[in-house]
Amino acid sequence: MAIEKTNRINALFEFYEPLLTSKQNEYIALYYRDDYSLGEIAENYHVSRQAVYDNIKRTEVILEAYEEKLHLLQQFQQQSAQTDQLLAYVEENYPEDSVLLKLVKKLEQLEE
């Protein structure tokens, strides 16, 4: 469960990072991306561990609220799955069509 939550928060953070304050960005990046402990973050910013925890929890709620309203992660995941299906279909049914394969691979690159 912890890995799934970490992956989800990181994915949401990728989409909504510009909407967060600098402190929210720093704490979430350190905690989820860089795997810092609450204590390490608190020590670096000269605040209590509880202050870091509260900030991270509030930011998680904010990220989920953005996703609930904007659905950017959900749309990306759906588009990615459809692109994967399209690529598999093209590779199976049109392996000799290099133009079609290039076009589908360009679609995949747009997702990155």
Image (tube, rainbow, N blue to C red):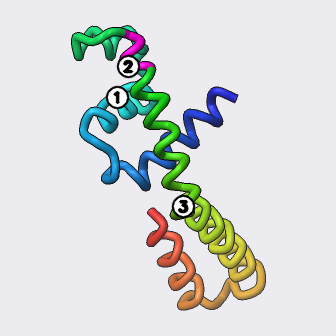
Q: Quadrant of residue 34?
A: top left
Q: Is residue 111 above or below residue 20?
A: below
Look at the numbered discs 2 and 3 and tell me whether their residues touch, using CB distance below 8 Å.
no
In the rendered structure, find residue 27 and report the number of the disc placed on it.
1
Question: Going from the N terminus, do you reach mark 2 or mark 1 first?
Answer: 1
Q: Is residue 28 above or below residue 82?
A: above
Q: Nearer the viewer, residue 104 or 52?
A: 52
CA distance for labels 3 and 1: 23 Å
Q: Position of residue 72 (x, y in %)?
A: 52, 63
In the rendered structure, find residue 12 and report the number of the disc placed on it.
none
Image point (34%, 52%), residue name: 19
Residue type at the position of mark 1: Tyr
Does the magenta-highlighted stretch encompass residue 80? Answer: no
In the rendered structure, find residue 69 and report the number of the disc placed on it.
3
Tag nearer the camera, 2 or 1: 2
Q: Which residue is mark 2?
A: 52
Look at the numbered discs 2 and 1 and tell me whether their residues touch, using CB distance below 8 Å.
yes
Image point (23%, 16%), residue name: 45
Label 1 Cα crowd, 10 Å radius (few <14 / some 14-19 / many 20+) = many
- Main SS type for the magenta part? helix
CA distance for labels 2 and 1: 7 Å
Q: Position of residue 4 (x, y in %)?
A: 65, 36
Magenta extent: 49-53
Q: Position of residue 37 (x, y in %)?
A: 42, 14
Circle 1 sits in a helix, a strand or a loop, which is it?
A: helix
